[in-house]
């Protein structure tokens, strides 16, 4: 459960950090948005080092599934765009894959 919270926290930090660049570069907002974005991306990288995984690549693969669902949540709650059925189907496939990677015995 701790790892899931770390992954979710990392996702929020990564999405926020990247979104600040989106604000600046695509929506012509102030460059000062990038400052908290960089800090958020640093926290994101730090959080991923705290998950219980022997290998970085496996941790990143599991994180990828959580990142996709978190991104669609961001789409809905921050950008006010509801995910469509293909978003939901695609995210479901990714979560199933992430759970296989996370929970299957080695």
Image (tube, rainbow, N blue to C red):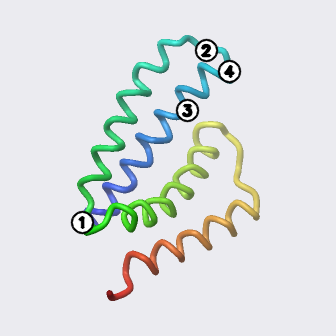
Mark found first going from the N terminus, 1 or 4: 4
Mark found first going from the N terminus, 1 or 3: 3
82 versus 79 height, above or below: below
Cα–Cα gap, marks 1 and 3: 27 Å
Q: What mark, if any, has residue 15 been given in the picture?
A: none
Q: What mark, if any, has residue 27 been given in the picture?
A: 4
> What SS does tag 2 mark?
loop
- Viewer-nearest residue: 65 or 4: 65
Say if mark 2 contacts mark 4, CB within 8 Å.
Answer: yes
Q: Which residue in the structure is indicated by mark 2? A: 29
Residue 90: where, in percent of width, then height?
A: 67, 66
Residue that appears at 23% across and 55% down: 50
Q: Which residue in the structure is indicated by mark 1? A: 52
Cα–Cα gap, marks 4 and 3: 10 Å
13 versus 86 height, above or below: above
Q: What mark, if any, has residue 19 been given in the picture?
A: 3
Residue 6: where, in percent of width, then height?
A: 31, 55
- Viewer-nearest residue: 38 or 77: 38
> What SS does tag 1 mark?
loop
């Amino acid at each position: 459960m701790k790892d899931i919270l770390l992954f979710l926290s990392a996702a929020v930090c990564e999405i926020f950090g990247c979104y600040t660049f989106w604000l600046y570069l695509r929506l012509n907002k102030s460059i000062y948005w990038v400052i908290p974005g960089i800090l958020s991306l640093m926290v994101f990288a730090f959080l991923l080092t705290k998950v219980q995984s022997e290998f970085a690549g496996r941790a990143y693969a599991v994180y990828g599934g959580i990142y996709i669902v978190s991104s669609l949540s961001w789409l809905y709650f921050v950008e006010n765009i509801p995910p469509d059925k293909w978003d939901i189907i695609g995210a479901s496939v990714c979560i199933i894959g992430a759970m296989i990677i996370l929970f299957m015995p080695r």
